[in-house]
Amino acid sequence: MKKQILIVPSIFFLFIISIFFYLLTIDRNPSEIPSNLINKTVPFFETETLLKNKKFISSNEFGNEIILVNFFATWCKPCREEHKYIIKLSKKNNLRIIGINYKDDPKKSIAWLKNLGNPYSDVPLDKNGRIAIDWGVYGIPETFVINSDGIIEYRHVGPITKKIYEKINLLISTLK
Amino acid sequence: MIPTIGNFALWLSFFFSVFQLIFSRRSKNIKYIGLIVNCLFFSTLISFFLLMYSHVVSDFSIINVVENSHTTKPLLYKIAGVWGNHEGSMLLWILVLALFNYFIFKLINKENLFFILKTLEVQAFIIIGFSLFTIFTSNPFLRILPAQLEGLGFNPILQDPALAIHPPLLYLGYVGFSAVFSMSVATLILNNKQNIFWYNCMKPFVLAAWTFLTIGITLGSVWAYYELGWGGWWFWDPVENASFMPWLIGTALLHSLIIVEKRKSLQAWVLLLAILAFLLSVIGTFLVRSGILTSVHTFALDPSRGIYILVFTALLGGYSLILFGTRSKNFFNNNYFSLFSKEGSILVNNIFMAVVCATVFLGTIYPLIVEAFTNNKISVGEPYYNSTVIPIMIPAFIVMGVGPILNWGKEDKFKFLKKIFPSILFTLSMTVIIFLFYKSYSILGIAGIFLSFWIISNNIFNIIKKNKNYSMGMFVAHLGAGLLILGITGSSVWQDEKIITMKVNSEVKIKNYNIIFDNIEEIKGINYIAIRGNFLVHNDKKKIITKLNPENRFYPITNIFTTEASIHTNLSRDLYIVLGEGNINDGWVVRIYYNPLVIWIWIGSLLIFFGGIISLNINLKKLLK
């Protein structure tokens, strides 16, 4: 029996380890989950809004300009952390941002937006989570970029970090 | 004050492990080393209990307690909260490492002195690695100033008795393999010049680790079944795979050790399995803790932690496997045996186990490999595992059925046929009976039932004949495996599922049962509020069998909704109801599962666990005699 074969496990092991090492050091986001909705039109929904006394009908709103859709809730800690980036995004690009308020108490949401600032043009309410299901939302917070044809260009699961903020900025400037 | 002492004790553990490394290398004075081993264990124990104490009294000056606890949490979950998070669970890792370290030392005697000292040296190196990791990247005693008034709470989905004890048992399994690993590396380093029976020392550790891993995985599965409300008990989640792989290798190791003991063959193979079992445990920890892949268990997304564990894994694995590659040729011998014998059957099953493990490993890391080379994201799910693992398991189970009744050395073909004749008859008749009862034409179902009774009947006929070759532990464990296969087959092949919207007073039929939605009410628990549905279950004779009360809970502290499935169990099936979303006008979404034979999964796994305990007991008695 050739004894060289005994060294195979170590070679295989080092191969696996180097893949892990590579993946850990490159800039990657394991929670970036490919969405079936990318390059498709936004799912239709119709619901009440938080601050305005009117119905939000998605087909009337999307398709005219670039819009950022952000699913958020007051009970979600990471939403609070990403909020400053949402505000920055709305100011810097003069971007329209729709914040879908997921399974939340409207009173708390109003207070929350008063405290932290309101970057949203509209806040449609998703009281029972139905809209989130249609959008294939994986976890709160989640953010979508929709182009001026009403097509979903980008999706991010989890809070917006500095890196993601820059990525979204870049994407918006290319879309314009 | 308490956290400072806890932190100090953790540092002491680190220093004692450094002393252990130095002393077991330089000095041969057993007294000193024994003292160090004891001190190491006690300082870690103190550190662990001080963290537990801080959780119990809700010391909100500690970040770890703030982030994972709350004053309203029941005491059991305050205690379980210690290991319900990354930092605390790392401390538990070190505690278990120190515990096995202590047991390794207990084996020391004049004959195996060098071997045990070398093992302690390797074990000390592992403890140093993990304690440095914990102290610098995951210190559970970090303070927060000013102290908080209240904690952030605990993920309510983890509030479950099975899950409270699942991690410690699982860690006893994972970390137990550290001792096996250390012994294997020590054997390779020493080239076994003293001709020590290293495999006798290794066996109780393999048995202990494997047994605890078995029960740990079972409890995790029980939790998934009762708490997640998805109607199933195994999802091929990366973390489940991370525990399943060392278990498979552990199973192979356990059985091939029997051959080494009996014939001195396969030593190199056993040394390799011993290394792999622990490496897979550590890689599993890495996969879960580094955030390199997402799973329901993902602890924390911190790349610095990932890099540290990875570097440490690379050191352990690189060193041990290269050592294996260069030294293991000294452990080959020419004690060949016939394939048609007990040794032969064990070897064949060893290969099957290794192949299944490789398959699961490939499935788990394949998405990562694809991403590294092509930047595409793919996911590997149940279809892959079902279509690869099951075909390998079927021949493995056939061999498993006959293994225990085969002779050592060589088996006579004619005598063998005579031996298996009654069990073939019994197996066929049981398969036909069950087939007629369920009237299912699933080939997989029939195969599963056949294999299950094949293993069970061979075992039982073997014990009736008072075959000299059987051990009680093996009998119980193999019987358990047979029942486990029965349960897995029933619950996966004949499961029935209904998802419907139900209003109060409406009814639905599943199999022979009529389920009536009686009413819905609001209830208040210790730290949650819930709506609870009351369902009446009638059988086909219109008699009420049971009431099922699934709940939809809301935990205000963490703002999390959970579902509590309600399950009625008997020996032939589970009725499993989950209450979904809804309101009084439109009705509620209700998921109802008819899960045949699930109870046999738990009974089977428990028997495997007890089989392990019995064998462990016998082996320890033999070793310490």
Image (cartoon, coloured by chain):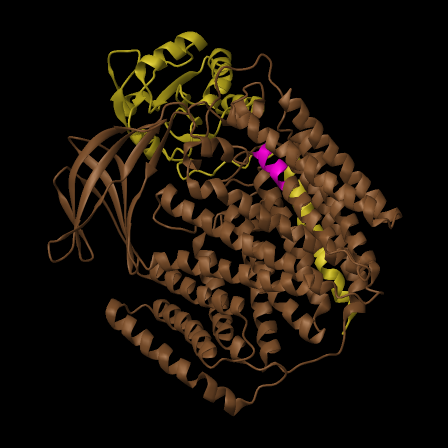
Chain colours: A yellow, B brown
- Residue at 53% x, 27% y: name it: B55
Which residue extends farthest top? A114
Residue B604, image quadrant = bottom left
When the figure is inspected, residue A41 is found, relative to residue B221, above or below; the finding is above
Camera-side residue: B520 or A10? B520
Q: Which residues are magenta?
A: B86-93
When the figure is inspected, residue B227 is found, relative to residue B261, above or below; the finding is above
Q: Count the marks.
A: 0
Residue B384 visible in the picture: yes
- Residue at 80% x, 43% y: name it: B20
Residue B362 visible in the picture: no
Residue B186 is situated, as x and y percent measured from the top left of the image, at: 78, 56
When the figure is inspected, residue B492 is found, relative to residue A131, above or below; the finding is below
Query: Looking at the figure, which quarter contains the N terminus of chain A?
Result: bottom right
Residue A163 is situated, as x and y percent measured from the top left of the image, at: 58, 25
Camera-side residue: B242 or A153? B242
Camera-side residue: B434 or B456? B456
Residue B50 is situated, as x and y percent measured from the top left of the image, at: 61, 29
Is residue B385 on the magenta stretch? no
Camera-side residue: B181 or B45? B45
Which residue extends farthest front? B625
Which residue extends farthest right? B26
Residue B457, image quadrant = bottom left
Our reading of the magenta stretch's main secondary structure is helix
- Residue at 53% x, 89% y: name it: B413
- Residue at 70% x, 54% y: name it: B181
Residue B342 is situated, as x and y percent measured from the top left of the image, at: 58, 78
Q: Is residue B108 left or right of residue B64?
A: right
